[in-house]
Image (cartoon, rainbow, N blue to C red):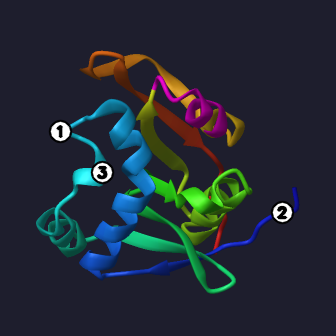
Amino acid sequence: MTQKFVQLVQTTEPTLIKSLYQQGFLDIYERYHDEKTDPYLTTIADITTRLSLKNNYFLLVQANQTIVGLVYIEKRWHTVEIGNLLILPEFQNQGYGQATLTAIEAFFPTIQNWKLNTILQEQKLIYFYEKMGYKRVRYLKIPIKEKMDIVFYKKKRKAIKV
């Protein structure tokens, strides 16, 4: 697989964000039917609230001017939490996830601490984040529903001086 390059572009368009969430998280929603925390069910009001918060970003993931995904970021002091990262189904397994995480870290060069969470039962996601250098926070697991648990990851890296 050739290395992919993506560009991150901030968006403030709630309708576009909701549409991407529905496309990107439909598979997870259909698998778990999580009515409480699944991004698939995020409302325009929730998105608008997040857009109004300082240091929160919705970033379109683009390749060759085509939207291939979306990431939601919360930046707090020297920490970035990756809230939701999605690659649209037709672009998955092509290297865009890896390119996106690399681009996010470049987008915030002074950040040292990175956090995210994912579904324990989604072994493909677990493998991906661990491959990208994230370490699981031991003993921290939140049951969402039967056969669906959230686990937490962190990554520490040296900040790049700008």
Q: Nearer the viewer, mark 1 or mark 2?
A: 1
Please give the residue where the numbered disc 1 appears in the rendered image.
Answer: 36
Binning the other alpha carbons within 10 Å of mark 2 as few (below 14), some (14 to 19) or many (20 upward) gives few
Residue 29: where, in percent of width, then height? Answer: 33, 42
Q: Are marks 1 and 2 in contact (CB under 8 Å)?
A: no
Q: Are marks 1 and 3 in contact (CB under 8 Å)?
A: no
Binning the other alpha carbons within 10 Å of mark 3 as few (below 14), some (14 to 19) or many (20 upward) gives some
Work out whether residue 12 or residue 153 is closer to the camera in this orientation and state it: 12
Please give the residue where the numbered disc 3 appears in the rendered image.
Answer: 39
Q: Amino acid at mark 3?
A: Pro
Q: Amino acid at mark 2?
A: Gln
Q: Which secondary structure type mostly characterizes the magenta part of the structure?
A: helix
N-terminal of the two: label 1 or label 2? 2
Work out whether residue 26 or residue 119 is closer to the camera in this orientation and state it: 26
Of helix, strand and loop, which one carries label 2? loop
Of helix, strand and loop, which one carries label 1? loop
Left or right? Give the position of 2 relative to 103: right
Please give the residue where the numbered disc 2 appears in the rendered image.
Answer: 3
Binning the other alpha carbons within 10 Å of mark 1 as few (below 14), some (14 to 19) or many (20 upward) gives few
Q: Residue at x 50, y 47 (%)?
A: 114
User: Can you tell which quarter of the image residue 56 is in?
Assistant: bottom left
Q: Nearer the viewer, mark 3 or mark 2?
A: 3
Of helix, strand and loop, which one carries label 3? helix
Span colored in magenta: 120-128
Res. 121 mark:
none
Residue 40: where, in percent of width, then height? Answer: 30, 52
Residue 115: where, in percent of width, then height? Answer: 46, 43
Q: Residue at x 54, y 67 (%)?
A: 108
User: Can you tell which quarter of the image residue 146 is in?
Assistant: top left
Q: Amino acid at mark 1?
A: Lys
